[in-house]
Image: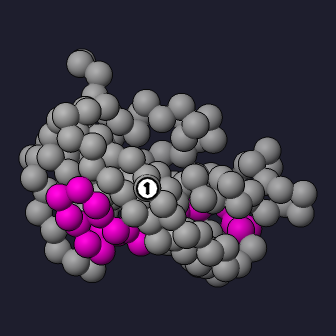
Amino acid sequence: MPNFTAQDPDYAHRVRTSFGRQTFMAHIGAECIRVEPGFCELALDYRADLCQQDGYLHGGVTGALADSAAGYAAYTLMPAGCSVLTVEYKLNLISPATGSRFLARGQVERAGRTITVVLARVVAIQAEGEKEIALMQATMMCLPKSSDLVPD
């Protein structure tokens, strides 16, 4: 795992505050459980109403979870006073999404001034342990002078 240093010492608060305003993440019940420089982990408990017709977690939900984990991993390394925006991603759904809980882990691979490349892995928690269900490679953009923070 690459070792990064955050530019903003208050990065974790900035990430958690921004995540708290993500209405879709709140709607599906996702939570931000771990934030470190260059890394973000989100969790989602299984819910039947988030599944597709065969009972697997819907690919759109899986993708949204991976996208947010990737975006917030990138955001941890961005300076204060900016916001993050997904430019593109590639999602591979590699195994049926069955389990009691799902974890999306975003890890920055390369952080630039404007563009950051992130890998996200989504795992399902099953009786046997963790099973990888999706992989994402994403490109995130730093939007300077466009802070998404609302004053406290």
The residue located at (50%, 56%) in the rendering is 67
Q: Amino acid at mark 1?
A: Val
Query: Which segment is the magenta one?
Result: 97-119
Q: Is residue 135 on the magenta stretch?
A: no
Residue 78 locus on image (x, y percent) = 20, 51
- In the rendered image, is residue 127 in sight? no
Question: What color scheme is it?
Answer: one colour
**Residue 39, horizontal then vertical, whole percent:** 31, 63
Q: Is residue 113 rendered magenta in the image?
A: yes
In which quadrant of the rendered image does the C terminus lie? top left
Q: Which residue is mark 1?
A: 87
Main secondary structure type of the part rendered in magenta: strand
Q: Residue at x 40, y 39 (%)?
A: 19
* Left or right: 45, with 112 as reference point: right
Q: Secondary structure at mark 1?
A: strand
Residue 68: x, y in percent? Answer: 46, 52
Residue in the picture at 54% in, 45% down:
30
> Which image quarter: residue 112?
bottom left
